[in-house]
Every structure is written in structure tokens, then in C-alpha cells.
């Protein structure tokens, strides 16, 4: 009986297992080294970021600011600072919240500027130059050196409003000193020892009480406030989160 020849089995080609390719490791982003300055706070050296404000640098150095930092965004007037720079004989002034540090800066804080302040009853004053002469006689020692203007962080024409006070021009005194934040940096530089910000405050008070035009809109609004018209809205805003309150603030109606 014939039999079929068994077919020869051809061995399968053996393939080498593919080597596992490791994924390339992601290159680590190397952060550029932060530029640092050396400054001296109350006589002690500290390394601080080169782009910091004086206030930010003080906190970076580990100091806890308990007072004189009301706004942190500029111009509340409570963080007056005096400083020197290396190789420079001058004394500079600025607000810690807006003045940037410089390498080698020596600084100290002046949270309170001592300045002469007249005591008076506004209802008994007369809006003229004689009142200024009586309450702040040092105004008339002004030599027009302009150091007060140069020291002002608000870029106010301080010398000009003191000259207006000497002339008895209360309207210009009020107008030029209107944005004064009473930081006192003008007074610490004045060789005539004038306390400019208090003179400006007197001028604004005299003008507001005796010389300004009466506003019917203000009278109406005060009546509305006294009638508690806005109490509900006040309570609602007091419960708002910061983002919502900020949005509401910038969307408010503004007079043209």
C-alpha cells in the first residue's frame, strides 16, 4: 500500500527581538539665574532680587513689615525711605512701594516724619494770606531752591504751591497741592524748615470751606446717604469676593 511521503517541514526563520528604545528624556529647562543685588537695610547687608522694590526687598530679607505698608501699589505716603548709593554723596528719598533697589544701596525707613503742625479752629479763620502768615510764618523764609519739588514722589510742583501760599492765592495752593499724600519727603529736604504738606492741607481746608462753589449734586447725594438709600448695596458689596468687587469697580459709571 502506497503511503504519502511526509512533507518536510522547513524551519521558520528566527527573528531577533527588537530592542526596546528608551524614550528620550525631556531636556530640563534650566531657569536663568536670578540677578541679585546687595543692599544694606538698617546697616546690614542682604542679597535681594534686582527687580524688587525697596518694600519687596525688605520682606525678601526676612523683615516683617507691621506698619507703613497700607497700599503696596504706590502713593499712600506711609513708607518714606531715605537712601544713599555707592560713590555718591547725595541723600535720595522715595517711597518703598514704588522705588526699585539699586546695587550697593544703603537705606533706612522713615515711617513718621516729624513736622510742625498748627492747631486752629477752621470756623474762626479768615481765608487770606494773613492766616497763613500767622499759622505758618516759616513759609515766608522760602528761598525757592526747589528741593521740595525734587523730593516729591508724586511729581507735584511743591515750590510753586508754597509761592502761591506766600501770595495768598488759596485757589492755586489748593489746586497744586491737591494730590499731596503727606509723606513728608519735601519737609525733610527743606532748608527753610517749611512743612509743605501741612501748608497745603490748610489751603485745601480754607478753600473748601470759604471759597469753593457749592455743589447741588453733593447736597443731593448727602441727603440720599442719610436716608439710607444705599445701605442695601453697601451690605451686598461687603460680602463680595475680591475679583467680583474689582470687576464692579472698573465697570462703574464715570462722569465725562
Image (cartoon, rainbow, N blue to C red):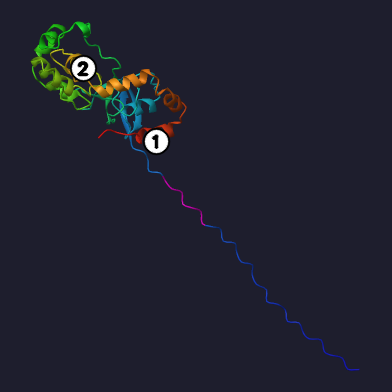
Camera-nearest residue between 252 and 195:
252
Tell me the SS state at disc 2: helix
Vertical comparison of 71 with 207: above or below: below
Q: Nearer the viewer, mark 2 or mark 1?
A: 2
Could you tell me if residue 89 is visible in this image?
A: no
Marks 2 and 1 sit apart, C-alpha to C-alpha, by: 33 Å
Stretch of the chain drawn in magenta: 24-30
Q: Quadrant of residue 229?
A: top left
Residue at 9% from the left image edge and 12% from the top image edge: 140
Q: In the rendering, which numbered label is found on residue 217?
A: none
Tell me the SS state at disc 1: helix
Quadrant of the rendering where the N terminus is positioned: bottom right
In the rendered image, residue 242 lying in the magenta stretch gets the answer: no
In the rendered image, residue 29 lying in the magenta stretch gets the answer: yes
Crowding at mark 1 (Cα within 10 Å: few <14, some 14-19, many 20+): few
Quadrant of the rendering where the C terminus is positioned: top left
Q: Quadrant of residue 150?
A: top left
Mark positioned earlier in the residue sequence (2 or 1): 2
Residue identified by numbered label 1: 247
Residue at 17% from the left image edge and 23% from the top image edge: 175
Vertical comparison of 106 with 11: above or below: above
Camera-nearest residue between 208 and 102:
208
Could you tell me if residue 226 is visible in this image?
A: yes
Crowding at mark 2 (Cα within 10 Å: few <14, some 14-19, many 20+): some
Residue located farthest toward the bottom when viewing the structure as drawn:
1
Residue at 31% from the left image edge and 30% from the top image edge: 53
Residue identified by numbered label 2: 208
Q: Quadrant of residue 61?
A: top left
User: Residue 166, percent across and down?
Assistant: 9, 15
User: Residue 99, percent across and down?
Assistant: 27, 29
Amino acid at each position: 500500500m502506497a503511503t504519502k511521503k511526509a512533507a518536510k517541514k522547513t524551519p521558520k526563520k528566527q527573528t531577533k527581538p527588537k530592542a526596546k528604545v528608551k524614550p528620550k528624556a525631556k531636556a530640563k529647562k534650566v531657569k536663568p539665574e536670578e540677578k541679585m543685588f546687595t543692599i544694606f537695610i538698617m546697616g546690614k547687608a542682604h542679597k535681594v532680587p534686582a527687580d524688587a522694590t525697596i518694600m519687596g526687598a525688605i520682606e525678601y530679607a526676612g523683615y516683617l513689615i507691621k506698619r507703613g505698608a497700607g497700599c503696596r501699589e504706590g502713593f499712600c505716603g506711609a513708607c518714606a525711605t531715605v537712601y544713599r548709593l555707592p560713590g555718591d554723596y547725595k541723600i535720595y528719598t522715595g517711597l518703598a512701594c514704588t522705588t526699585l533697589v539699586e546695587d550697593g544701596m544703603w537705606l533706612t525707613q522713615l515711617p513718621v516724619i516729624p513736622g510742625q503742625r498748627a492747631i486752629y479752629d477752621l470756623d474762626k479763620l479768615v481765608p487770606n494770606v494773613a492766616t497763613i502768615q500767622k499759622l505758618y510764618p516759616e513759609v515766608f523764609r522760602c528761598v525757592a531752591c526747589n528741593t521740595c519739588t525734587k523730593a516729591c514722589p508724586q511729581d507735584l510742583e511743591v515750590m510753586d504751591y508754597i509761592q502761591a501760599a506766600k501770595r495768598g492765592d488759596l485757589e492755586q495752593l489748593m489746586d497744586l497741592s491737591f494730590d499731596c499724600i503727606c509723606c513728608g519727603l519735601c519737609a525733610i529736604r527743606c532748608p527753610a524748615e517749611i512743612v509743605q504738606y501741612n501748608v497745603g492741607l490748610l489751603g485745601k481746608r480754607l478753600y473748601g470751606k470759604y471759597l469753593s462753589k457749592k455743589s447741588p449734586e453733593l447736597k443731593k447725594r448727602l441727603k440720599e446717604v442719610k436716608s439710607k438709600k444705599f445701605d442695601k448695596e453697601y451690605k451686598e458689596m461687603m460680602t463680595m469676593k475680591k475679583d467680583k468687587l474689582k470687576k464692579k469697580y472698573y465697570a462703574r459709571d464715570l462722569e465725562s
